[in-house]
Image (tube, rainbow, N blue to C red):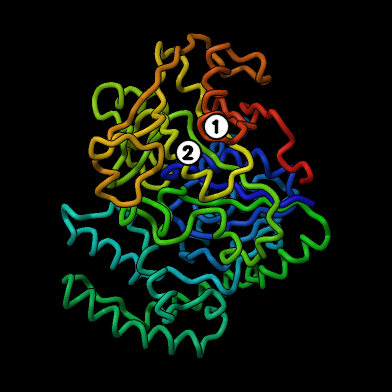
Amino acid sequence: MTTLVAVGAQWGDEGKGKIVDWLAPMAQLVVRFHGGNNAGHTLVVDGEQTVLHIVPAGILDPSTVNVIGPGVVVDPAALLQEIEELKQRGILRDPSRLRLSGRAHLILPWHTALDKAREENAKGRAIGTTGRGIGPTYEDKVARRGIRVADLLNSEVLEAAIHRIAEQKNFELVNYYDWQAIDPGSLYQQALEWGRQLEPYVDHTERVLEAALREDKNVLFEGAQGTFLDIDHGTYPYVTSSNCVAGAVCAGAGIGPTRIDRVLGITKAYTTRVGGGPFPTEETGAFGEKLRELGAEFGATTGRPRRCGWLDAVMLREAATVNGFTQLAINKLDVLSGLPELRIATAYKVNGKLTHDFPMTLKEIESAEPVYESHPGWSEDISGVRRYDDLPANARSYIERVEVLAGVPVELLSIGPGRDATISRNEPFRPV
């Protein structure tokens, strides 16, 4: 039995879904432990694309049980739509393959309304959220006034909670933002229907996880977003509302830290970011546009164009420290093919001083000037390569330099969107 945590090493969008889908046949349980439907995982198998937002990316492998843990916030309408699409395609025939924690908090219409109203009202100070209600839901969770999945199955508890919370939410929506009020009666009736449809999937997921561990099954924990969107360790306030680092598995899934064996950090071969916030290696000119085009850098959830730039080893080192990476996966190496020169940021200049450490404050990050080293590119098409030794020499040199700069071995390489376009240098679930 091996437990493996797969988390993003950048600002999200690192291609975690593709890696989790590739790893899933080696695991028996795939567990999502934080975030909500603000995350999007795009999977390509046999030329067919699947975009997931809440359901773990292991769902395409019929041998896996996929768990949505208590640390996730769940939009019931969005989840049911995703379930229906998977059922229509014959992927999710048996409800036992998808387990939903009764302790997960619900994203309700007032959360999405407040999210959008606040972003609109913020104007130039907007964070750049997806407008999916994630932040307001986590606020209610922490304030101990949230509604959880299990509440959908108790009509008396549900009705009282909706009417109690609606009064406060509608006051804020109507009087502060001049938005339309949410009708609590209609919401209650809708929520009852959500509960009826979701009941076959609701479970005590901590027990499901514990049973898998006792049976010596391989467990894969699937992160959403990325390290630098973490509420504590990211580029605050331009972050998401949950903890995205590997340590969040313990609270968000319900597992002790002594039972985590390996942590896989996932990064692109370059860097991207969606939304506002500092981005030291961003290329805002023609090359940034070219990289966006080459990498098809548009969000799976929102379709927003991603900001693009060179690989940032300062960030990678910070991510390796915060998460305790035991190995790295590099995605989209093929996107760099044909570029005559590649650059990696190895340090920053902050207020005229050289630093190899990621700065602590937003002001320092905003003023950071990357210090680059250059590497020769390669012209060969690598999309058909399946062995590391068959990669061009310059591609191997680039990867091996990343290993040195990050202090972590690169064990997986993605050289295309398809599941098979993957190079493995080691057994991911090998015993510790």
Density class for disc 1 (Cα within 10 Å; few <14, some 14-19, many ≥20) is many
Reply above or below: 397 against 18.
above
Q: Is residue 74 left or right of residue 164?
A: right
Circle 1 residue: 330
x and y, in percent, of residue 318 in the image: 46, 44
Can you give x and y, in whole percent of width and height, for residue 341 in the image?
40, 14
Q: Is residue 45 left or right of residue 426?
A: left
Picture quadrant where residue 45 is located: top right
Using residue 222 as the reference point, say whether residue 25 is left or right of it. Answer: right
Sequence-wise first label, 1 or 2:
2
* Of the two numbered discs 1 and 2 in the rendering, the one whose residue sits closer to the viewer: 2
Tell me if residue 9 can be seen.
yes
Q: Residue at x 56, y 53 (%)?
A: 246
Q: Is residue 90 visible?
A: no
Q: Is residue 306 above or below residue 108?
A: above
Three-letter code for the amino acid on which mark 2 is drawn:
Leu
Residue 291, image x, y percentages = 36, 25
Residue 71 percent coordinates (x, y): 53, 66
Query: Residue at label 2?
Result: 316
Helix, strand or loop status at disc 2: helix
Question: Image height check: is 217 above or below 182?
Answer: above
Q: Amino acid at mark 1?
A: Ile
Q: Residues within 10 Å of mark 2 (few under 14, many from 20)?
A: many
Identify the residue at image location x=48%, y=84%. 158
Query: Distance between the Cα atoms at labels 1 and 2?
Result: 11 Å
Secondary structure of the residue carrying tag 1 is strand
